[in-house]
Amino acid sequence: MQTKIKTYRNGWLAMLEKTASLDAPYVALVRTATGEIYDKRRCDDYRNALDYYRCFSLIAKNQPR
């Protein structure tokens, strides 16, 4: 799986990546325009990680500049 990154005009971004960890092989996160992590979730399966990625994309998209 390739890392998915969506960057929005307001500077926020949503990201989904696969890690080497066996406990939680997927990580979904959203970053603010300044680069700080706003929220981060580690998931056991791809379906849950994709759901978080979609929600984080909506959060990033709807933030003011």
Image (spheres, rainbow, N blue to C red):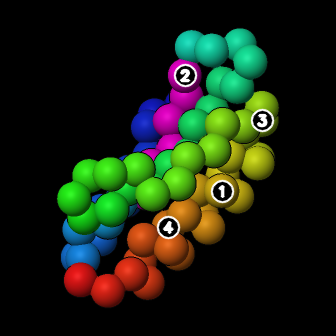
- Tell me which numbered mark, 4 or 2, is placed earlier along the sequence: 2
Most foreground residue, 59 or 7: 59
Tell me if residue 17 is in the magenta stretch: yes
- Tell me which numbered mark, 2 or 3, is placed earlier along the sequence: 2
Q: CA distance from mark 1 to mark 3?
A: 11 Å
The range drawn in magenta is 14-19
Q: Which mark is residue 45?
A: 3
**Label 1 sits on residue:** 52
- Tell me which numbered mark, 1 or 3, is placed earlier along the sequence: 3
Q: Residues within 10 Å of mark 1 (few under 14, many from 20)?
A: many
Q: Amino acid at mark 3?
A: Asp
- Tell me which numbered mark, 1 or 4, is placed earlier along the sequence: 1
Q: Amino acid at mark 2?
A: Thr
Dividing the image into 4 quarters, which one contains the C terminus?
bottom left
Determine the main secondary structure of the stretch shown in magenta: strand
**Label 2 sits on residue:** 19
Identify the residue shown where x is 50% and y is 73%: 59
Q: Are marks 2 and 1 in contact (CB under 8 Å)?
A: no
Q: Amino acid at mark 1?
A: Tyr
**Label 4 sits on residue:** 57
Q: How far across and how far down the image is residue 18, in percent?
A: 55, 28
Q: How far across and how far down the image is residue 15, in percent?
A: 45, 49
- Asked which secondary structure carries label 4, the reply is helix
Q: Which mark is residue 31?
A: none
Q: CA distance from mark 4 to mark 2?
A: 20 Å
Q: Is residue 53 above or below residue 24?
A: below
Q: Residues within 10 Å of mark 3 (few under 14, many from 20)?
A: few
Left or right of residue 25, residue 39 in this image: left
